[in-house]
Image (spheres, rainbow, N blue to C red):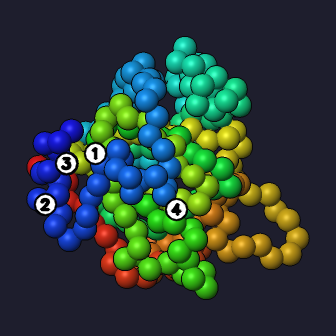
Amino acid sequence: MAGLLEELRRLNPHIAIDPVESRKFARYGMLHKAAFPGLVKTSLEAFPVSAPGGGYIRSLDALEIHPEAAVLRNGILGQMDGEIGVCWGHNHYLNGLEWHNCTEVTIAASPLVVLLGDLRDMENGRFDSHKAEAFFVDSGQVIEIYSTTMHLAPCEVREGFNCLVVLPRGTNYPLEAVPGKHDPALHSRNKWLVAHEENKEMVEGGSPPAIYGPNWEIKPLQ
């Protein structure tokens, strides 16, 4: 891990990148000692990091039925049900931030850099990206981020990224049509999303342009 992190730091002197073992990360979440090599292997087989394209699937059957899924639910989730999905692809930028009314467990199937913000740092519905922090997550590491932590798709370290995403079942499903106005940041069930004001695609898609300051870029290793 040390070699990858030092190389990332050399390529990205514009932003501090700390390991998730750092005390700084405690503001945003916790690092679990558990390991789920079978789930990681299954995720990488379904979506190799070097493959073109990318996306997010909130629940992947091959992960849901894997024997390690029961260990994950009985342990980290405290015997609660959780959908086990995957996020994969290519990303270098902050672009936006989301949050949930619950914790989220992320299992890194490849090395990642996560860009995080604290919801409590938003002022008048806006967030200064100078307050975002970057953390390196090595392959196989399991992190749990708090409901007050804003996050989005991780940035790749090399070639692409793949991570498992575990959330309470029902999260990220489409919203029901209800009368009256709702929070414009409420994107889907249990998911609030705001865009960086430079991200035209997300803004045109309806996400409030609530993030200002640098749209942080993480340059990957070649």
Q: Is residue 171 left or right of residue 52?
A: right
Name the residue rendered at 49%, 55% in the picture.
28
**Residue 195: percent from the left, percent from the top?**
49, 72
Name the residue rendered at 29%, 54% in the picture.
18
The label on residue 5 is 3
Q: Quadrant of residue 140?
A: top left
Q: Earlier in the sequence, mark 4 or mark 3?
A: 3
Q: Earlier in the sequence, mark 3 or mark 2?
A: 3
What is the residue that sits farthest to the bottom in this orientation? Answer: 124
Residue flagged by tag 1: what amino acid is it? Answer: Gly
Residue flagged by tag 2: what amino acid is it? Answer: Leu
Q: Is residue 38 left or right of residue 174?
A: left
Q: Is residue 25 left or right of residue 51?
A: right
Residue flagged by tag 3: what amino acid is it? Answer: Leu
Q: CA distance from mark 4 to mark 3?
A: 22 Å
**Residue 201: percent from the left, percent from the top?**
45, 71
Q: Earlier in the sequence, mark 1 or mark 3?
A: 3
Name the residue rendered at 69%, 39% in the picture.
169
The label on residue 150 is 4
